[in-house]
Amino acid sequence: MINQDTIVALATPSGAGAIAVIRLSGKDAIRLADAQFKSVSQKKLLEQATHTIHLGHIVDGERTIDEVLVSVFKNPNSYTGEHVVEISCHGSSYIQQEIIQLFLRKGCRMATAGEFTLRAFLNGKLDLSQAEAVADLIASDNEASHQIAMQQMRGGFSTEIAKLREELLNFASLIELELDFAEEDVEFADRTQFKDLIDRITHVLKGLIDSFAVGNVIKNGIPVAIVGEPNVGKSTLLNALLNEERAIVSDIAGTTRDTIEDEISIGGIGFRFIDTAGIRETKDVVESIGIKKTFEKIEQSQVVIYLFEADVFTDNSEKSQILKVEIEKIKNKYPQKPLLIIANKSDKLSQEQSSELEVALNTIEGSQSLLLSAKTGKGVDQLKETLLSFVNTGVLKNNDTIVTNTRHYDALLKALEEVSKVKYGLETGLSGDLLAIDIRQALYHFGEITGEITSDDLLGNIFANFCIGK
């Protein structure tokens, strides 16, 4: 599966910048770079030690393209496990393309998406879960997702899985050996120890599977829908959370006709806030479409903020009763979603009114509530702390392994199913040949995670999501 071509690609983002890095990898990488490089010290790249950097010029015949720094990495001590050359040139788009086109004419091939990391996997520099973590690390946009990706890239997850797989493989070998001596009715695998191992594997697998609920929201961000009647301050709250004028704010009811989304990091976790159109009866066609989208966004969100004007709850007016009904509707329609009820414009209330309102809000079951003023910013920090409390960040603080990859999650579920069959077989005295079948299937799903078992289609799907140059 390892392609012997020498590949080239831009390793830094496209476009003009201070510098750009062009990467070559393959058996001829150093030879091809050496032919187009003139060192200021007259050194030949082919004669230099690995992990060295050299100043000189990239030339095309008599034409000098740019002054560059060339880094040399010799196999197997490189990212891909092959000869690798990285050319740091000036960040002009023209220079980048001239250098890349030069090496394409001299025998290189353009790298495909993720091909450098694919070669690192195929050459044993990374296992498959570590390779996938490289893409997650590049995509990480908050502290938590960065922390998880770094842990997986260092092999925390795959090491745990590989250790369990090795122990299970040892017992599988003993079970298989018993089949060769079936007529003599001997047991090489201690069934008590085997049962203890299965219990331990089951415990670890369930913990990893449960962690996916946290890992998925950390990786993709937590969508939070801000809903309520028109003109209660939803857009003002969004602007206060983002600390910028992201949404148009007006005294005119129904200003927000469409959803507005933006993301911030709170305590290292990404939250994606969705400012929705105000919910009310209206004959305005455009506003009606916006209200319909509001309910669609509530469906997609994981947390719902219901915003209302604080002074509404300070009396027993008809509007106050309607508000209670609307809150109950959302609670009943979305019982699994955390609901946060926020009384906005609390700066208009007296201390006595604020106390009365807090008591009244505490009577609403199945939700959390707080008072704030989006206009002055009072209570916004408390809101952020409350939102963070909805996420189980304990696993992060304890540095536990967290699963964020859907493919890993699916393989873990299948592995647990097979391990459960093995456990049932041990408890019911199932014959060794049938036990061996279930053990092989469990080992297969473990191997899918770390890459001992792969297919071209699987690798194609994984590395197609990488950027070219990585």
Image (tube, helix red, strand yellow):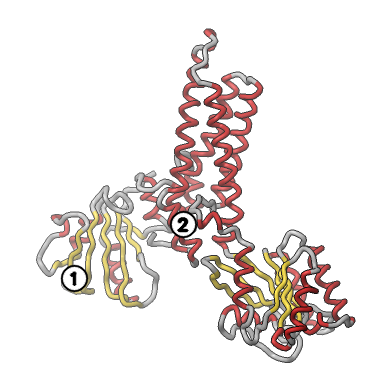
Q: Which residue is drawn at the image coordinates 86% and 72% (left, top)?
A: 325
The alpha-carbon separation of the residues under discs 2 and 1 comes to 37 Å
Is there any visible trace of residue 256 in the rendered image?
A: no
Tell me the kind of residue under disc 2.
Ala
Is there any visible trace of residue 419 in the rendered image?
A: yes
Instruction: Left or right? Give the position of 184 relative to 382.
Output: left
Instruction: Left or right? Give the position of 402 relative to 258.
Output: left
Q: Which residue is drawn at the image coordinates 53% and 31% (left, top)?
A: 197
- Where is residue 105? Give x, y as percent: 28, 63
**Residue at the extreme right of the image, as rendered:** 318
Residue under pointer 2? 149
Image quarter in which the N terminus is found: top left
Q: Which residue is drawn at the image coordinates 56% and 82% (left, top)?
A: 243
Task: Identify the image quadrant of residue 87.
Answer: bottom left
Q: Is residue 189 above or below residue 338?
A: above
| SS for dot 2 | helix
- Where is residue 219? Give x, y as percent: 54, 60
Tell me the kind of residue under disc 1.
His
| SS for dot 1 | strand
- Where is residue 349? Give x, y as percent: 74, 86
How many marks are shown on the rendered structure?
2
Tell me if mark 1 has few (under 14), some (14-19) or many (20+) residues whose alpha carbon lies within 10 angstroms of its own.
many
Tell me if mark 2 has few (under 14), some (14-19) or many (20+) residues whose alpha carbon lies within 10 angstroms of its own.
many
**Residue at the extreme bottom of the image, as rendered:** 251
Residue under pointer 1? 57
Q: Nearer the viewer, mark 2 or mark 1?
A: 2
